[in-house]
Image (cartoon, grey):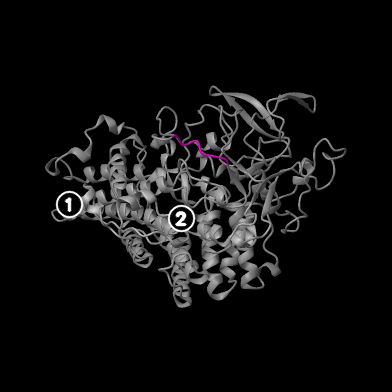
Amino acid sequence: MKKITSKILTLSALAGMLVCASSCTKDLLDLEPTTELASNAFWKTEADATFALQGAYASIRPLFDRDYYFDGHGEYVRTRGTSATSGNLRLGDAYHNGNYNPVGYGASFDKYYRYLYGGVNRTNYVIENVNKMLATASPSSRENLEAIIGEARLLRGMVYFRLISMWGDVPYISKVITDNSQVADITRTPMTQVKDSIMADFTYAYEKLPAKAPVVGRAAKPAALAFRGKMQLYWASWNRFGWPELDTFKPSAAEANAAYAGAAEDFGKVINDFGLTLFRNGEPGVIDDLGKAERLPNYYYLFTPVANGDPEMIMAFTHGGIGTNQGEELMRDVAGRSHEGSQAWVTPRYEIADRYQSLTTGDFVDPLIPMNPNTAGARTRPGSAVNPQSYADRDYRMKASIMWDYEMSVGMINLQPTGWVPFIYQTWNQPITINGVRYTTYNTDGSNSGYVFRKFLRNYAGQGRSEGNYNFPVMRLADVYLMYAEATNAINGPQADAIALVNKIRHRGNLPPLAADKTASADAFFAAIEQERIVELLGEGHRGFDLRRWRAIERVWGAPYSEGVWRRDTHGANQQRYYQNADERTYQQAYIFRIPPGERDRNQNLTQNTPWM
């Protein structure tokens, strides 16, 4: 596995280029690299150990902070490519060259696989050396050193969790790799054993971490519990729904029930034991009229730097912002050229609009009707997808998440505001007069659906498209609420506390509580939970993983050899058809990823997943 080792060493060297999770600002490249120091010159103090941990956070962050690309594996987000550029880790090199379409993606993550193992080695570097420090540590230092190991083990568990979620059985490496010969003949470890090691990492982290992180961006007990619960929830899903593409895995109903119960217990502690609350107490806030955006719902601000450090963010990766070369690139990925020359790599699909429910009934409304805007009456016909009034009185999260025709956002060029720009699909950068006011329309050709994201889009100038300082969440309290509801529902059906939590999330969209028929059975409540996962977690990288663990790809795209499903736009034009006449192998390859051939060429002991043989 020569490639893995070389990438590991590269990651260790580049760790200092990335912002520290504790928001440190000193350029680590100005310091002597710890990887080149003899042990007698480093690993002596708590400060040394903390410094190394910051490097581990810096190496793990770019493996998770652009997970919104993965939403392209679902049916509600289109990822037409990535802004990540080869050779530049800050720009998300781990995600580069991945296929983020709903089909045909399983062979496109060889680079991501290697970078994940780089993250493993970086965390092992901290764990191994701080464990050595414990042997001679003073009693006063021991607690802090154990907490540092706990954070590193949490990060390692996150990486291995991602590895098995995509590839199933993977090599398990628990020591620092410094020479290719150390992994030249390593085999794949059964997923059950890897899962047990992940659970051990999360458990150690829970036991050793403080109840509250010392600084924003560092992990604490709630993060360890939440990830341990999520690991158990996924384990329960695989055991309940099966994973036939992984021929070494044998599902068990008893294992599923035990894992659901364990997940529910962990999520319950996160919810009840640490005083965590939803952003702005889950209140919906205020919403502007259609076509205006001076007052946006609270849900919108949850995805701006206003929410950095908020209790809802159980774990989030920090970014440097202006002038650091360590900013997040959310605006570059979700916005268009009117917003600091951004590129709209990631956009909502047309179908997401129909998922936003009525404020009056709390249920779905009639599907929107795609219409060519040049058709007489198209802009005023009730229910028309190009009639702005068709979007009135919907879940507040709709206006906070997407923009449709005549919705406004603040244009920005050269760090200066350019005024309001109305989005009008396929009318890019054109003069237009609305209510007597002259505007220039939103300039982007990145959308092929009729919508663009408002979620993650800054509404103030002063930062370039690559200079964001938003802390990207990898675990949110709202997600924990929904996972708790899913776990308890799988065991005992709809429970009052779980229903109340789902209704809390709905309240942030100003929706009424679930109607009785939505909680009348386990199946009905699961559908309500899935609905909330779709709209609440849109663009955060969860949908593709949910579809795979639930064995739901056929439910969304049709059975093998069916006609497939067209994705269209607000004008009624067909854009892409997915899974048309797709055979069983195509579906199998969507459920499990290919072990990189380059790794197998270097190590004949690495077997291949069955659909890729």
> Could you tell me which secondary element the residue under label 2 belongs to?
loop
In the image: residue 484, left or right of residue 565: left
Residue 422: image x %, image y %? 70, 31
Residue 220: image x %, image y %? 37, 54
- Give the dominant element type of the magenta stretch: helix, strand or loop: loop
**Observer-nearest of 50 and 85:** 85
Indicate whether 340 appears above or below 52.
Answer: above
Q: Are marks 2 and 1 in contact (CB under 8 Å)?
A: no
> Could you tell me which secondary element the residue under label 1 belongs to?
helix
Q: Mark on residue 593?
A: 2
Indicate whether 566 appears above or below 197.
Answer: above
Query: Does the rendering let one see residue 274?
Result: no
Q: Which residues are magenta?
A: 80-85
Check the image and name the residue furthest to the bottom.
254
Instruction: Please tell me which of labels 2 and 1 falls first in the chain.
Output: 1
Q: Mark on residue 271?
A: none
In the image: residue 424, left or right of residue 460: right
Closer to us: mark 2 or mark 1?
Answer: 2
Amino acid under disc 2: Phe
**Observer-nearest of 360 and 3:** 3
Check the image and name the residue furthest to the right.
376
Kindly report the distance in space between the C-alpha atoms of the residues bearing marks 2 and 1. 39 Å
Q: Magenta span has 579? A: no
Q: Magenta span has 82? A: yes
Crowding at label 1, few (<14), some or many (≥20) Cα neighbours within 10 Å? many
Amino acid under disc 1: Met
Q: Say how many tags the image has.
A: 2
Residue 567: image x %, image y %? 68, 48
Q: Residue at x 53, y 34 (%)?
A: 332
Which residue is denoted by mark 1 in the rendering?
133
**Observer-nearest of 555 and 607:** 607
Which of the image's four quarters has the C terminus?
Answer: bottom left
